[in-house]
Image (tube, rainbow, N blue to C red):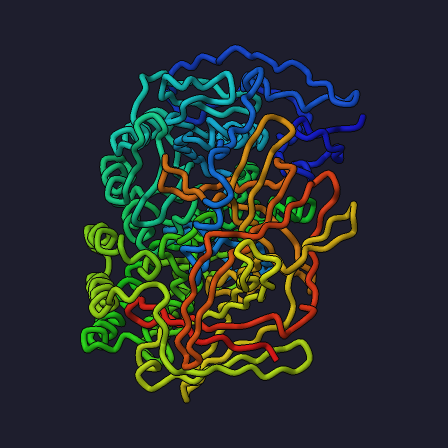
Amino acid sequence: MSRFCPKCGNPVPENARFCGACGTPFSAPAPIQEIHPAQPIQPNAPQVTAIPSQELPMVEVALAETEPPVAGFAQADECPPKKTKKKWWIILVSLVVAVAITLGAILVPELLQNADQSDNAVGTSDPSGVNVDPTQVTRTIMIYIVGSNLESVYGAATDDITEMVDAQYDLSKVNVLLCAGGANEWQNETIDADETSYFMVTEDDVIEISANAKMNMGSANTLSAFLNYCATNYAAQRYSLILWDHGGGPILGYGDDELSRDSMLLSELQAALKNSPFTGNNKLELLGFDACLMGTIETAWALKDYAQYFVASQETEPGQGWDYGFLSQLNQCHNGGEIGQKIIDSYFDYYQQLYAQSPSQESEITLSCLDLSQIDKVEQSLDQLFANVNKDVLAGQLGAVSRCRYSTKAFGKYASDTGYDLVDLKHMLSLLSSHYSQATEVVSSLSDLVVYTRANVSNANGVSIYHPYDLMQEAGQWIRTLSGLGFADHYVDYLDNFVAGMNHNAVSVGYYQNFSKTKGQSVTSGQQHDLSIQLTPEQQQTFSAAEYYVFYEMPAEATFSKSVEYLQVFSGQDVTLSADGKLSASYGGKAVYGKNHKTGKYSDCPLSMNQIYDGTLEEKYYFPCMFWELKNGFDLLPVNWLMKIKNGVPVLLNAYDMVADEETTFPDKYLINSADYNVYTFANNSYKVASDGNGNTQFTFTGSSYGFEYDRDEGFSIELRDIPDKSQYRAVFIIEDIYGNRYFSDFIPLQ
């Protein structure tokens, strides 16, 4: 019998795990087997009462039937439709103004790159050093689920719990226990939003084992109570804890309880674990975060006294989160490191299959397993290194350190305009090693800490660290939060002095202050344009970063003002500074044009193509765009539409909302699918440019934008094409110094 996606109606293979068109996950059919009563492994388990089974009504789609729900864990009769943010009141000018005021700032979402990386495999013995038979080990897996909007809007927790049931793990050796709360509503009929109850996952059901009044899931006491309950009532040889929900790294912490609007800082997570049985010689076998951005050295260090192994992602996670099919493989694992490897491999297998079937769903994914017994060595060597770096910063030598930080792979920018100032630790140390040989010793110690890691993007090596750069206004408060953990005192002192040094000579020069009398040049070979500009010795000393822009000169008769205006059509950050102070960039002379399939016509000029730079090597870009839904009601959403170039061909991916979600500070795990909208308007900002010919150029945003609109029903694609008339295009360098000041060069004609 044919099978169809219940969301979009697309036909899918019988054994598909998700829809190739829209990415909707399906619960895997449980294997046919003889059913035996679940056998709890604890001697004195409390009496449990199963929630009565309620099956969903069959949904008829083109004479096909949907997958039946897991018995006893029925999803709600009719889940509410995906809640889109109603931005209909935002007119097009809000989009272009938002982009205009950030001219020169790169909004850095993350994209996909198929480049798996893995470190040394984990060991096969018990932490005590004694070889054990993993099939005889009993385990209790505790999963703390803060439902948040991930459940109330998207049903993500319900999907993952269904995966846990479908895993068909060995119930005679494993308990899987849940604490669920913190969501306005649940997309199933078992979990009550007015309670914070505990559940057991069985071979075909989810049963409530303790009904509790509604509690604050962002409180350390709630987590501690769950851990103590599990240890008391479900005895096992080994315990693991998985924390499920939003994550915000070492500063913002974990969890976003929709009801209390509370979350847990690292200090609160420490308190919860300290008040649990899992201390001293009774550490958790594994502690994992099915959450964004928690794969940091500070998070791992804060929790080192409570777990043997640690699994978390450096990057934001896709909305579907982990694949809980790994539960079926627990009896193959000797230790938490091997469990971590199973989690990571199942995670990657799932998304590689999804992205192969639905390329537009691609995003950057990372997941790592750390051996926490090695973290003290890393923390000590890191602290010693930055004691020396701090001396140079105090002496005013900021340039080299600032350039290294700028060039380091950054995380958290995929669904955010600015990110969270989290960077790859190994990559940053590798860049610093050309100035500080001691950095190589820290890199060496990392190889013992990171026992297994996979990433589909370059320069993601398994563990991140907080280092301010983009968010200087928040840096003071965030550093104080970090200092309260007691992590690497010299490193924290260095951060304080780095921020103070960067801000010390910052003056209110305006966004368009120029560096004077510096003429650039363009050397053309075919379509390639080699741009360059010579910096003065003073500029070289304070240079931090640079980018370049390409503008299209719009004829006066085609503009609203009836005078010449310039449209930004490209921005790039692949700029290098030579030893003699020459700043260089290469523009390929190509741009992206939109094509209407019905008319066969291309856009009049290139779309505004902006390179994403986050310390990786991949060709990634975004387009400012407006998504419209005009068929089913009215919805308007300003977005940045992500694109990457694969084998010379531009491919549109998902998009992210330009307007930040005011209800949470955590990154959005769910990106925006263009298929949910039917009209797309691309916007190019327009500028007036005045130059005195001596390197002094003034850019003024006109307040206007020239858009190119496409209807999805008429067919639409983008193409990378040579720019037709080079005489209509100009380039400009934008330089940022170590104090955050920005300077513009004069126009450089593309000749």
Camera sees residue 77: yes
687 lies left or right of 25: left
Image mark count: 0
Q: Quadrant of the rendered structure where residue 496 is? A: bottom left
- Which residue is farthest bottom? 580
482 lies left or right of 578: left
Q: Residue at x 36, y 18 (%)?
A: 195
Q: Is residue 201 above or below residue 492?
A: above
Nearest the eye: 458 or 706: 706
Camera sees residue 321: no
Nearest the eye: 130 or 682: 682
Q: Residue at x 63, y 77 (%)?
A: 528
The quadrant the C terminus occupies is bottom right
The quadrant the N terminus occupies is top right
Nearest the eye: 125 or 416: 416
The location of residue 388, given as percent across then percent down, is 23, 75
The location of residue 70, given as percent across then percent down, is 59, 21
The location of residue 194, given as percent across then percent down, is 37, 17
Q: Residue at x 20, y 53 (%)?
A: 480
470 lies left or right of 693: left
Q: Is residue 502 above or below residue 53?
A: below
Q: Is residue 130 above or below residue 43?
A: below
Q: Is residue 397 above or below residue 705?
A: below
The location of residue 406, given as percent across then percent down, is 39, 67
Q: Residue at x 78, y 23 (%)?
A: 62
271 lies left or right of 401: left
